[in-house]
Amino acid sequence: MRKTLITAAVCAAALITASTALADGCMLAPWQYEIYETGQIAYLDYDSDTEVEQLHILPRFHGDSQNFAWIIPVPGLPELDESDMQIFYQLSYLTAPEYRNRDEGWGCTQEDYVMSPTNDGRDGVDIIASQLVGIYQAMILGAADADALTDSLTTWGFLHTDNAADFTPLLEAYVQDDWYFVTLKVDSTAFAESQDNWYWYGGMQPVALTFTCETPTYPMRISALSAVDDTSVILYVNADRRLYFDGAETEYANHLTENEARVIRATYPDLGSILEVGDYLTKLKRNYTPAQMDADILLEPAASNAEYRRIYYSGVPLTSGLLLAIAGVMFYRARRRRV
């Protein structure tokens, strides 16, 4: 099995910048303010033996960060923690396409190189926890009534008269499925103290949510209310096999060997601390319109467990260059004879 992890990591670090599409859940603005979610990016780690999912989310938006508010529904009671921005940097570099020059063809082309496989809330709303998570003041909520949840979120400043009516039907669907809700608002003091340490191309500090679920899940439905017309969703998925979701394009798939895990730990230490030998890391991407965000993403085993990484070829081919040089010499000599 031929692998090019070390070479690809070096090339990617030199040639590729970090992904620019990032978050999940729904971003909200106060009345007469605007916040738009410009993309979604997340790292999802799923253990099929324990049915425990850890979801690292990096929110990216257009708007005033001081007015930032965020609601994330999850299928199991979550634990909250800060996540590390370096994980997203390093995932971007590790899974980036490989760039090569070759002695055939012209210009830039793309190829998929296949490697061998291997309670202050209203009645019906329960405030389960309230805590500071990095720059966010966070709450974990349980709800038995969507109308009560809407009222509570309005009272706390997450919703207002311009958007509450649109939210109630979505909240009703999650309440009926017995999901929990995480709310986050920027804490101004924590924001001022840590801003220089986490800000990345308009993105906020990432967070990690850990919960149990029978199927690895990425919350999507609620995003439709704050997404732009063409929202890029990028999911890095770590599981015991290659996973997939409907309509997604697989940009990277690799079952980590012992040597690869060693290289990752040396090259990308933050990422290496959460990846292990035998993990299957996949990068999935799909663009959505708000109308297409009508269901949460449920990840399923892919049809094939084959590994691959994308490769781009560029440069003038050597053989073609030599032929052009020979043709140029022959043309020059023929022209001199005529003169």
Image: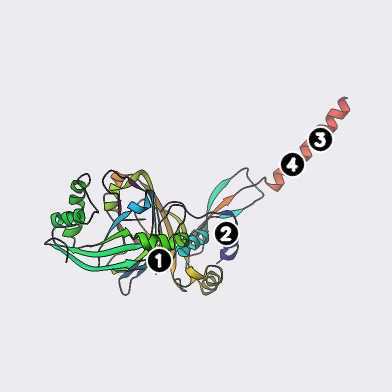
Residue type, mark 2 in image:
Ala
Q: Residue at x 71, y 46 (%)?
A: 319
Disc 4 or disc 2, which is closer to the eye?
Answer: 2
First along the sequence among labels 1 and 2: 2
- Which element type, helix, strand or loop, lies under badge 4? helix
Q: Nearer the viewer, residue 63 or 115?
A: 63
- Mark 1, Cα crowd under 10 Å, few <14 / some 14-19 / many 20+, is some
Distance of label 4 from label 2 (alpha carbons): 34 Å
Q: Quadrant of the N terminus?
A: bottom right
Quadrant assignment, res 244: bottom left
* Colour scheme of the rendered structure: rainbow
Disc 2 or disc 3, which is closer to the eye?
Answer: 2
Q: Which mark is residue 83?
A: 1
- Mark 3, Cα crowd under 10 Å, few <14 / some 14-19 / many 20+, is few
Q: Is residue 92 left or right of residue 6?
A: left
Residue type, mark 4 in image:
Leu
Distance of label 4 from label 1 (alpha carbons): 54 Å
- x, y percentage for residue 96? 52, 57
Disc 4 or disc 1, which is closer to the eye?
Answer: 1
Disc 4 target residue: 323
Distance of label 4 from label 3 (alpha carbons): 11 Å
Q: Vertically, is 107 above or below 25?
A: above
Q: Nearer the viewer, residue 281 or 198?
A: 198
First along the sequence among labels 4 and 2: 2
Magenta extent:
23-35
- x, y percentage for residue 85? 45, 63
Disc 1 or disc 3, which is closer to the eye?
Answer: 1
Disc 3 target residue: 330
First along the sequence among labels 4 and 1: 1
